[in-house]
Amino acid sequence: MFFRSNRGIAMESGFSRDNPCKVGIWRIKRRDARCPPIETPLIIRSNGAEEAVSHAFVQQLAWEGSIILKQIKDNRYLFLMFALPFIYFIVFKYGPMFGLLIAFKDYNVMKGVFRSEWVGFHHFKQFIFDPYFWKLVRNTVVINVYMLVFYFPAPIILALLLNEIRKGMFKRFVQSVSYLPHFLSTVVVCGMIVNLLASDGIVNQVVQAFGGEHIPFLMLSDWFRTIYVSTEVWQKIGWGSIIYLAALAGVDPSLYESARLDGANRWKQVLHITLPGIAPVISILFLLTLGDILSIGYEKILLLYTGATYETADVISTYIYRRGVLGADFSYGTAVGLFQSIIAFVLIYGANKGAKRLGAASLW
């Protein structure tokens, strides 16, 4: 009699189903040549084959376990290197997801997460029908669209310009100067902005020197988006260009030589060689940026906005901070944050699918 299971186990015996014996010696062969055959007495019942297969599975799993343990032992240093980031993600990224439960509960600190009452989608409905909802969504989306239009291409342009500089010392100087703002904390940057744009700040002094009137930049809602986006570009452009410079280093130099022989000038080389060479990187980063269309860093806005600029400065993140943290409405704040994350996932998924259909680089 011969058996073959879907786990790669083959069994053969001198007994047949028509004349089953109660005890016999079974020789179990496996497809994997590294696994030795098993010869063991097994009790055979009327459906003896099934019981034997079950026993063989146990031995097969034990053998596979020993192989895994051997691989872990042989590669223990690689597993140790992997352990730290793995623990980090488990503790700080996946562990806090447990707290999302309170988005569906009327969370009470004294009762705890498990004993608080379930309220279903009550907090989600409350946020969607909140009178501030559309204003928050509009402000968040508009600022992020401004960032996509003005900030996203800025590091690409800087990287292309740096790639064209042939003097190494000047290139390194420009790179160092453009990187420095990235290392300034948000508090320091906001302090600089407040001092520069104050009524008696440098900007207003320059405006008055040319015959203009001083402008209360930080008190006018019309100026908030301009200030936020321009300072973000200044702070992040250098750091953001690093990944594009790395992508430019991977473009084949022989393509430029061929283009020069064909008479292509520098502009045509950038247009037909450089940009297509870094197009996959641009596509991936654009997809990741789209995922943040409904989220924006709240620290800088909290430090810059005032009651007079709420009309354009109040975004979903600052609203969560006010309701969730300052107002101690943790369930509502968590529900709004989860709503943001779901929208971000849908946007990334849709954009990734669109990129695949267009033949561009995609995330998965």
Image (spheres, rainbow, N blue to C red):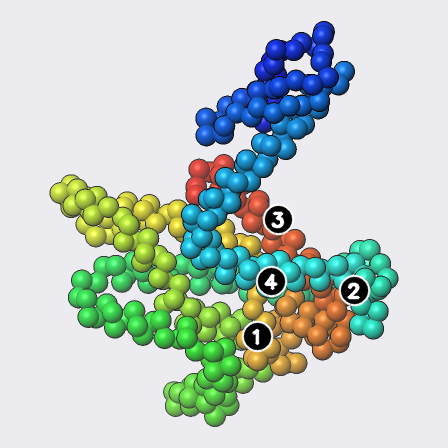
Give the mark nearest the N terminus, 2 or 1.
Answer: 2
Left or right: 78, with 91 as reference point: left
- Tell me the residue that label 2 is attached to: 113
How much space separates mark 1 and mark 4, taking CA atoms?
Answer: 24 Å
| Res 358 seen here | yes
Identify the element where label 1 is drawn.
helix
x and y, in percent, of residue 238 in the image: 36, 67
Residue ID at (66%, 17%): 24
Amino acid tagged 1: Glu
Say which residue label 4 marks. Answer: 91
- Given residues 66 and 172, the one toward you in this image is 66
Disc 1 vs disc 4: Cβ atoms closer than 8 Å? no
**Residue marked by disc 1:** 299
Q: Position of residue 157 (x, y in %)?
A: 34, 60
Figure check: 114 above or below 30? below
Quick one: label 1 or label 4, which is nearer the N terminus? 4
Q: CA distance from mark 3 to mark 4?
A: 25 Å
Residue at the disc numbered 3: 346
Residue type at the position of mark 3: Val
Marks 3 and 1, Cα distance to the nearest angstrom?
25 Å
Q: Earlier in the sequence, mark 3 or mark 4?
A: 4
Q: Earlier in the sequence, mark 2 or mark 4?
A: 4
Q: Can residue 213 be spotted in the picture?
A: no
Q: Please tell me which residue lies in front, 218 or 98.
A: 98
Residue neighbourhood size for the residue with mark 2, other residues' Cα within 10 Å, grouped as few (<14), some (14–19), many (≥20): some
Q: Amino acid at mark 2?
A: Val
